[in-house]
Image: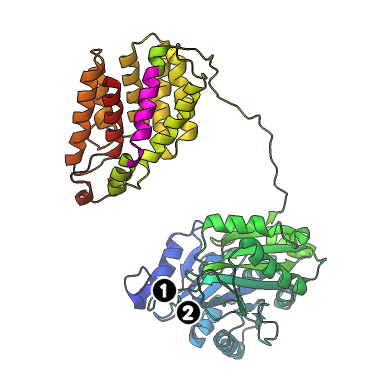
């Protein structure tokens, strides 16, 4: 089963290239119209008096390589099919199209197809009278005994350094020397917990087991060096840093590129950046590039680190401005700063007081919710996540305890409602605690404005509806609470209890919930089941009326 959005598989790369050109913020890209099988993105503002810088390879690594075409980086990118090198003809025609008397430099990742196809194209271009040089990037250090290390995300830093040199008007031999120095100074290693998925297959999801990562996974999904039984970010970064330090030495100042291999969330990438700066490499890191998508492997769930041993010239080159969509600016590393702000406590200040009638009402309400805990959980298990009874009981126990200890302002209605609202926001979980806190707090404020109790409670209900979004008929506690409070305006608790029970029972025939977790439940599961919040309200008023 494919996990890929596309219309026509044969046109996938061509369609993607057009999307890259259309969305370029600098409006400086064009597609070379050579042959339908040749897909090349080039600078539309190119001056052939400068050394051309050409790169490319298989698609699927976006923004590489087309995303790095523009002033200060690549002159052109030759795009092959997914994970497949572009043809000799494609590379040769690109060289011929963009190269002037100053010549061109090819930047090639160290894969057999790319080396051969770019190499043969270079020889053909030389035969045609052009000046051409080629560098091969092999920055991957995951397989230390490999005589042909792969070219991975560090290639982008070569693009940037070489592009800067060409933009300064250096001669081809000078640009070539800069490229060789850059290639010798960059070291990369990647890790993944899941390989990539091609349009024509679901990918090898079984190779890397749950809880494991593969160190040194290739950017085409090639197996890595080792599989490790951890996904802990600190442990994974430590393994990568250990290998990078062996390559860079322990003293060299570094810039580190943090590359998303395509399927890692922005949250995780930010965490990895923080983890990197808590590692043993931190003391050497002067600059950071990313974290960002730079050289991806379709949707691979992983990332790579690329370190470059810095020189003043490299810093200048990496810092220079470019007009490309894919490059990320070089960021000078600075420790995290914090600004001290005094914590504000909005605790309600109350003076405890006694009122026998109010104390009895508080006891009735809290005992009702505690005694109905199991029943309400049972109802909620049918239409929600099964915790409504426990949530209400938790709040009720806290208020009951405060009352028993004589810590409530029972003779000050406004202060009592506000204190209850404050406590429920603290001790009740989820949205219920916040909603009930809004209800009681707003009602308490209305009491301070000399409103009668029933009117104040209805004002609190209006604020609950305003912030919570539910209305009568949405199959929530409001379907019982609103009619009960409206009936309470007559002064009769019995009338309020009858209205609450009628409202609660009506929820059992409501086929669709408009708010709360029940809104995600199929109507078949709701049929005949009273909303647990409405049932809680009905139970409270029934016990108060006794």
Residue 112 screen position, x and y as percent: 58, 88
Q: What is the chief secondary structure element of the magenta stretch?
A: helix
Q: Are marks 2 and 1 in contact (CB under 8 Å)?
A: yes
Q: Quadrant of the C terminus?
A: top left
Q: Is residue 317 left or right of residue 513?
A: right
Judge whether 306 appears above or below 115 on screen.
Answer: above
Give me the disc on residue 13: 1
Q: Which residues are magenta?
A: 360-374
Magenta segment includes 373: yes
Q: CA distance from mark 2 to mark 1?
A: 8 Å
Q: Which residue is mark 2?
A: 80
Q: Position of residue 111 (x, y in %)?
A: 58, 84
Element under disc 2: strand
**Residue 193 magenta-highlighted:** no
Q: Secondary structure at mark 1?
A: helix
Q: Nearer the viewer, residue 395 or 74?
A: 395
In this view, 267 is above or below 467: below
């Amino acid at each position: 089963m494919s996990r890929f959005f596309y219309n026509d598989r044969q046109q996938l790369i061509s369609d993607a290239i057009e999307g890259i050109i259309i969305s370029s913020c600098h409006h400086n890209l064009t597609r070379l119209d050579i042959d339908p099988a040749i897909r090349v993105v080039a600078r539309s503002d190119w001056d052939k008096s400068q050394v051309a810088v050409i790169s490319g390879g298989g698609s699927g690594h976006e923004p590489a390589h087309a995303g790095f075409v523009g002033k200060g980086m690549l002159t052109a990118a030759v795009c092959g099919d997914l994970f497949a090198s572009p043809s000799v003809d494609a590379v040769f025609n690109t060289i011929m199209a963009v190269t002037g008397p100053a010549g061109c430099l090819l930047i090639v990742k160290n894969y057999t197809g790319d080396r051969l196809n770019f190499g043969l194209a270079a020889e053909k271009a030389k035969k045609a009278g052009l000046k051409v040089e080629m560098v091969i990037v092999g920055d991957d250090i995951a397989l230390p005994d490999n005589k042909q290390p792969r070219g991975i995300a560090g290639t982008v830093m070569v693009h940037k350094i070489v592009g800067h040199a060409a933009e300064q008007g250096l001669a081809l031999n000078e640009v070539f020397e800069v490229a060789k120095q850059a290639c010798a100074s960059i070291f990369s290693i990647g890790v993944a917990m899941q390989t990539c998925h091609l349009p024509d297959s679901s990918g090898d999801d079984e190779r890397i087991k749950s809880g494991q990562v593969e160190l040194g996974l290739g950017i085409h999904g090639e197996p890595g060096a080792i599989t490790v039984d951890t996904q802990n970010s600190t442990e994974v970064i430590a393994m990568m840093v250990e290998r990078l330090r062996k390559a860079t030495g322990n003293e060299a100042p570094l810039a580190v590129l943090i590359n998303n291999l395509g399927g890692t969330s922005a949250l995780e990438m930010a965490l990895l950046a923080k983890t990197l700066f808590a590692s043993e490499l931190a003391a050497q890191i002067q600059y950071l590039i990313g974290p960002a998508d730079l050289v991806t492997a379709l949707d691979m769930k992983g990332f790579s680190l690329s370190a470059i041993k810095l020189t003043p010239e490299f810093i200048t080159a990496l810092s220079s401005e470019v007009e490309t969509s894919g490059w990320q600016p070089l960021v000078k590393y600075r420790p995290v700063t914090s600004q001290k702000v005094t914590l504000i406590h909005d605790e309600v200040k109350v003076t405890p007081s006694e009122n026998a009638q109010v104390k009895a009402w508080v006891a009735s309400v809290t005992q009702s919710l505690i005694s109905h805990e199991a029943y309400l959980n049972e109802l909620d298990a049918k239409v929600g996540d099964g915790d409504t009874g426990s949530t209400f009981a938790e709040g009720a126990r806290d208020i009951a305890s405060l009352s028993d200890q004589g810590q409530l302002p029972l003779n000050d209605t406004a202060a009592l409602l506000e204190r209850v609202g404050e406590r429920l926001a603290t001790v009740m979980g989820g949205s219920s605690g916040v909603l009930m806190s809004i209800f009681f707090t707003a009602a308490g404020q209305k009491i301070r404005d000399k409103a009668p109790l029933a009117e104040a409670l209805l004002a609190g209900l209006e604020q609950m509806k305003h912030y919570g979004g539910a209305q009568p008929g949405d199959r929530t506690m409001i379907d019982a609470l609103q009619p009960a409070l409206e009936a309470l305006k007559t002064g009769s608790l019995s009338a309020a209890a009858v209205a609450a029970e009628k409202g609660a029972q009506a929820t059992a025939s409501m086929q669709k919930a408009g708010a709360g977790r029940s809104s995600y439940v199929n109507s078949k599961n709701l049929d005949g089941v009273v909303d647990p919040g409405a049932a809680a309200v009905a139970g409270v008023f029934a016990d108060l009326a006794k």
